[in-house]
Image: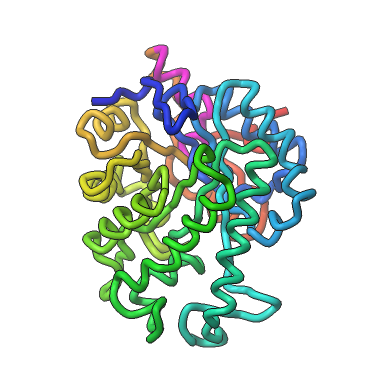
Amino acid sequence: MAHLFDPLSIKGVELRNRIVFAPVVTNFGLRNNQAIQYFVERVRGGVGLIIIHGTPVDLLLRAGWAQGLRPLVMAIHDRGAKAVLQLWHGNELNGQAVAPSVRESYRQITREEIRTVVEKFATAARHCQEAGFDGVEVHGAHGYFIHQFFSPLTNQRSDEYGGNAEKRMLLGMELVVAMREAVGEKFLLLYRHSAVDGIPGGTPIEESARFAQALENHWLDVIDVSAGMGRTDELSIPPASAPEGTHAELAAKIKAKVTIPVIAVGKVQTRAGAEKILQEGQADLVALGRQLLADPYWPEKMQEGREDEVVSCTYCNFCTQEMHAGRPIACLQNPNLGQEK
């Protein structure tokens, strides 16, 4: 069984440990010194992999914009971690509100437009590769546009993209195949997926396990297991009352069906909790978000036996409240957040 500070090699990309900084939206921007210092502080603290939060694929279609991320990637690499950029697509296409199916003010996206979205992800992945990233991650979770295709709650299409689980898997598989064709074999492709919606009539874990198998068969490298349908959902953002490693059992059910590495996320706070996930074989990597906002040196302190010095996240969710309000994230436990320089 793996341990927290064991290295992991994924297709030649060497991670120094099993600790991942989860993709927490900051509202700092990315192509500036503030962002570089923020991410570098987490690397100095000891994480092995940084997943940079969801970035619109439309921005990344511009090769020059993507190249502007190179200083950030180089700063992460120079201090010993690897960098993956999360690709996000919202419900807007050519200035119009679209969705898998008609709802409220959204019209149904056409087949031709779906192909355009797939092409955008492929181009964005290639530009990230050219900018020096080690990989990209599809944001296919938390009720956003890509997840809406998989969830039966938001996909009532009657064509090849909707209906049974296999049809609702199609967009995710097409994205991975197109990106793989664009970037070749060595570049890492990750997929963040909500394993359950947590709402009656939503996705059951059995369908998500089949989806993970299909993604692996279509050249995915890592599956990142989250849960829930969005910003006000306690599955997506576990509260203080949630148990530690709240999504680890979901990750374990998916890991039982695939051979590629699995990331578990959800209120991981102690070394014992993180080690339990790895040693019980529930996942291969553990991702921390809010805890690494409160204390970016959590990994170093855990490795050196200084657990009593950790500044613990209280899961008050002040950070996410600020983020959803469109303001830069802040942390009541860490007044230096966003001011690391």
Please state the horizontal and vertical placement of residue 333, each as a whole percent of the image: 53, 35
Q: Nearer the viewer, residue 120 or 98?
A: 120
- The residue that appears at 54% across and 82% down in the rendered structure is 110
- The residue that appears at 67% across and 54% down in the rendered structure is 327
Rendered-image quadrant of the C terminus? top right
Residue that sits furthest to the right in the current view: 64
> Dominant secondary structure of the magenta stretch?
helix
- The residue that appears at 69% across and 46% down in the rendered structure is 28
State the image quarter where residue 334 is shown: top right
Q: Is residue 56 visible?
A: yes
State the image quarter where residue 260 is shown: top left
Q: Is residue 332 visible?
A: no
Please state the horizontal and vertical placement of residue 186, each as a whole percent of the image: 51, 37
State the image quarter where residue 121 is shown: bottom right
Q: Nearer the viewer, residue 310 or 49?
A: 49
Identify whether 18 is placed above or below 301: below
Residue 254 lies left or right of residue 23; in this view the side is: left
83 in magenta:
no
Q: Nearer the viewer, residue 54 or 234?
A: 54
Residue 328 lies left or right of residue 194; in this view the side is: right
Which span of residues is magenta-colored? Answer: 290-304
Please state the horizontal and vertical placement of residue 226, each as a whole percent of the image: 37, 52
Identify whether 47 is placed above or below 87: above
Rendered-image quadrant of the N terminus? top left
- The residue that appears at 69% across and 76% down in the rendered structure is 94
Q: How is the image coloured?
A: rainbow
How many marks the image carries: the answer is: 0
